[in-house]
Image: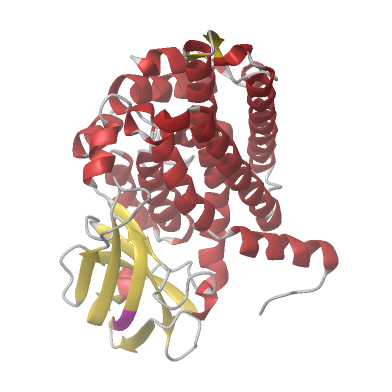
């Protein structure tokens, strides 16, 4: 199989593996084996059919990789770097699976872990860590993508309940989730609050978004909330302003930087393997100077992305990761991944557009990853404000 050739190519040129603990290596190995043995042989079919890969989700539940480093509550012990390695490897296999994990663990579970009550944590996190319960994170609205702080979904207190009205868009797992973290603006205080909405709640209507050309094997939803009533004890007590939603999002930008590295790694490995096998003008493509030049520059970009990710992990361990450091890492790695994947697709020639060779799937998926959790432009302006002291947007 072509994948057997691709996986034999090495990308650890700077010996990053030497920096990993035994536990981190084990998380990497376990996830890599899952990707190579179970994901790659079947994922193209799910992607082409835009079908959610339930069998792969069931297999993933047995790996002990769902939790994004949350301590306790049935979540597997994972360092920040182990968490990143898991995201990297899943996205090396497929962006849809990586995005699923990002929503489940990085957004939904982290919202509950960071902002929920003890009762809410006990109720949801153990089952979500086993993928017995699925979660979603409903922040983005049809008219408020990058400008998410301007969300219009409203929450009005009525006795021991909240009445929520509004719309959400691009909500991963929104049609499948057992619990959805819904962000809405309190009509009284005008502050943004978070609510846990259980499956089957009247007034919650989710429709799958079809026609996507990216991340086709994971489902996003457009959600309409009509006089939806949520009990007060389903409100996240730690979510009292938009800054609290921002705290959750800052953590996911770390995961997105690792995810972009996974996509770039896959594309480079496939291109290097292909060019070593493909013969033109009587010799393998790797014998041409221009091909070697391109492969080396692709590898150099991957090495720089690896170093970004390693430093992110260390800063999280030290409690020193800032929003703007996460922003520049997300911006840098998704931008570089796009370029590496484009080079790989070009090196494969006509075969580069065939799903059999996987690169075109990564090329499509990186477009969504480059956009979500904050576009390159927004991340740039966040860092720009930090280094100049001048805000260039509202």
Residue sitting at x 55%, y 60%: 374
What's the magenta bit mostly, secondary-structure-wise? strand
Residue sitting at x 58%, y 56%: 250
Q: Does 172 appear above or below 389?
A: above
Residue 172 highlighted magenta (yes or no): no
Residues 13 and 388: in front is 13
Colouring method of the image: secondary structure
Residue 237, given in percent of the width and then of the height, sits at: 43, 69
Visible residue check, residue 114: yes
The magenta segment is 162-166
User: How many dots with numbers?
Assistant: 0
Considering every residue shown, the one lying at the far bottom of the view is 188
Q: Does 286 appear above or below 85?
A: above
Residue 304, by quadrant, is top right
Residue sitting at x 25%, y 59%: 210
Considering every residue shown, the one lying at the far right of the view is 388
Residues 229 and 393: in front is 393
Residue 389, given in percent of the width and then of the height, sits at: 82, 70
Visible residue check, residue 61: no
Residue 124, given in percent of the width and then of the height, sits at: 30, 52
Residue 142, by quadrant, is bottom left
Residue 110, given in percent of the width and then of the height, sits at: 45, 52
Residue 15, by quadrant, is top right
Considering every residue shown, the one lying at the far front of the view is 281
Q: Does 56 appear above or below 149?
A: above
Relative to residue 43, is residue 365 drawn left or right?
Answer: right
Residue sitting at x 66%, y 40%: 312
Residues 266 and 66: in front is 266
- For the N terminus, give its image quadrant: top left
- For the C terminus, give its image quadrant: bottom right
């Amino acid at each position: 199989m072509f994948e057997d050739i691709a996986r034999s190519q090495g990308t650890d040129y700077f010996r990053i593996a030497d920096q990993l603990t035994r536990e981190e290596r084990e998380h990497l190995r376990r996830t890599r084996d899952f990707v190579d043995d179970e994901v790659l042989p079947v994922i193209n079919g799910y992607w082409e059919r835009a079908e959610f890969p339930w069998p792969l989700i069931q297999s993933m539940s047995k790996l002990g990789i769902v939790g994004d480093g949350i301590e306790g509550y049935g979540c597997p012990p994972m360092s920040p770097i182990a968490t990143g390695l898991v995201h990297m490897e899943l996205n090396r296999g497929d962006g849809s699976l990586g995005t699923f994990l990002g929503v489940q663990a990085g957004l939904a579970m982290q919202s509950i872990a960071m902002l929920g009550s003890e009762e809410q944590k006990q109720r949801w996190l153990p089952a979500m860590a086993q993928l017995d319960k699925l979660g979603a994170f409903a922040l983005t609205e049809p008219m408020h993508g990058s400008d998410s702080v301007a969300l219009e979904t409203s929450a009005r207190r009525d006795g021991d309940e909240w009445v929520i009205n509004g719309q959400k868009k691009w909500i991963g797992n929104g049609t499948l989730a057992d619990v959805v973290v819904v962000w809405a603006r309190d009509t009284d205080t005008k502050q943004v609050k978070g609510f846990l909405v259980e499956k089957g709640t009247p007034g919650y209507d989710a429709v799958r978004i079809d026609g996507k050309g990216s991340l086709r094997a994971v489902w996003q939803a457009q959600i309409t909330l009509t006089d939806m009533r949520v009990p007060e004890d389903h409100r996240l007590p730690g979510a009292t302003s938009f800054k609290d939603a921002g705290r959750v999002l800052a953590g996911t930008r770390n995961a997105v930087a690792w995810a972009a590295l996974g996509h770039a790694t896959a594309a480079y490995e496939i291109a290097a393997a292909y060019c070593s096998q493909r013969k033109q003008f009587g010799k393998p493509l790797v014998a041409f100077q221009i091909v070697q030049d391109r492969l080396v520059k692709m590898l150099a970009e991957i090495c720089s992305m690896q170093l970004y990710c390693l430093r992110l992990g260390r800063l999280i361990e030290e409690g020193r990761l800032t929003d703007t450091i996460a922003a520049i890492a997300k911006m840098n790695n998704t931008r570089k991944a796009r370029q590496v994947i484009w080079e790989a697709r070009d090196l494969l020639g006509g075969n580069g557009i065939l799903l059999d060779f996987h690169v075109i799937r990564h090329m499509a998926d990186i477009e969504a990853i480059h956009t979500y959790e904050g576009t390159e432009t927004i991340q740039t302006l966040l860092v720009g404000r930090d280094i100049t002291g001048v805000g260039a947007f509202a």
